[in-house]
Image: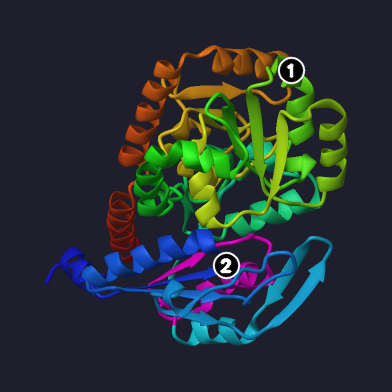
Amino acid sequence: MGRQEESRRSTECLTCLVVTNIPTPYRMHMFRNLHEEFERRGCTFKVLFMAKTEAGRSWRFSPRDFLFPYTIAKGVHLAIGRATWHCNPGAIMDILRRPPACLILSGAWAQPTSAALTYLAALARPRPMTLIWAEANAASIRHQTGVIAHARRHVMRRADGFVVPGRIAEDTIRETNPGAASRFLRLPNMVDEQVFGRSVQDLRPQCRELRTEFGLTDADFILLWPARLQEETKGILNFLRAVSDLFTPQVKVLIAGDGPDRPAIYDWIRAHARPNVRLLGQRSQEEIVKLLAIADALILPSLKDHNPLTAIEGLWAGLPILMSNRCGNWPEVVTCRNGWVVDPGSEQSLRDAMRALLDSPHSELTRMGMVSRGIAEREFSTQLVVREFAEALLDARRDYRIQ
């Protein structure tokens, strides 16, 4: 038996283990479908969570959400400011004793558990192929130089490759981590297209009733902005200060989300933009689906945003999208045919795009929404994404063993 044939057979039943911070609603769909795809190939896909929850990030889950093999590890969890750091020595030892064929480290690179595994995986026998799952975005990196940047590069160089959602993440890793591995596997973020695609389309015929439910009328031009109320990242006041004078009485900006800067944002809106802008607070998935069904466009003019899933939800909902060039997935989400890419640091850029959006006739917005839906089907189809990722991972593992 040749070496390549032996390697091919050895990967047919491989185990892939993802280590990540905590369970989150936006990852459950991905994990479930990756598990199903790997299972179809005779392989095993597992997830190890470092903790059940973190401060400020608490969600309710039902058993049906965990339709994939998983473990919630025991460990020490230290909250400092807005960050929580996880150390799971028992889980690290278990992984070293029974290493998977492929180890994918997700979440923050600086998590003690992730950093330790990046270094210690080399001691496991057999040695797993170790990949770092990174949503890197140069526009959102806080520490470009100094001790933290040096430590990040040191950790990145230990990996055998990277799992990235798109072009900006790959370019950022290449540019900021010289000497790191050159293997990149694409795994675009994905959402449940049945929820954000079909369910939204099914609700569209009820648009008038749904608008009434939210205190809106047929004449209103609705811009939906799902965003955490945190000015440093989402730039809500930065955007509103630049464009609010362009709003006619019919323009309604609906901001769905909550966060630490709600009081300041609320006070500014009350003084300058009422009743054009409404803070809706945190909304359930069911309510977000309704809002997508009544919206005329989705806006995401963020100051910093690694890889927002709300943009992908907007694509599946068939909406035109106005999006910041500091969002990590803008190259995959927006073209000149389905929306506008803005520079949130340029008031002129924000105003030009907003004028173009507000001046677009309904027929043009409908056409743009159809383009968005086509992008979703080509680039973010769950079945396509998980199949291509599984194939790429198996190929990478075979190459890794042959080396």
| Relative image position of residue 286 (x, y in whole percent) | 50, 55
| Relative image position of residue 275 (x, y in whole percent) | 75, 30
Q: Which residue is mark 1?
A: 347
Tell me the kind of residue under disc 2: Thr
Q: Which residue is mark 2?
A: 118
Q: Quadrant of the N terminus?
A: bottom left
Q: Is residue 167 left or right of residue 34?
A: right
Q: Quadrant of the C terminus?
A: bottom left
Q: Is residue 105 magenta?
A: yes
Instruction: Give the CA distance from mark 1 to mark 2.
Output: 43 Å
| Relative image position of residue 381 (x, y in whole percent) | 33, 47
> Residue at image x 64%, y 84%?
89
| Relative image position of residue 341 (x, y in whole percent) | 56, 24
Tell me the kind of residue under disc 1: Glu
Q: Secondary structure at mark 1?
A: helix
Compared to residue 162, the image places residue 299 above or below, namely: above
Q: Give the camera-side residue of 300 and 184.
A: 300
Q: Is residue 139 left or right of residue 118?
A: right
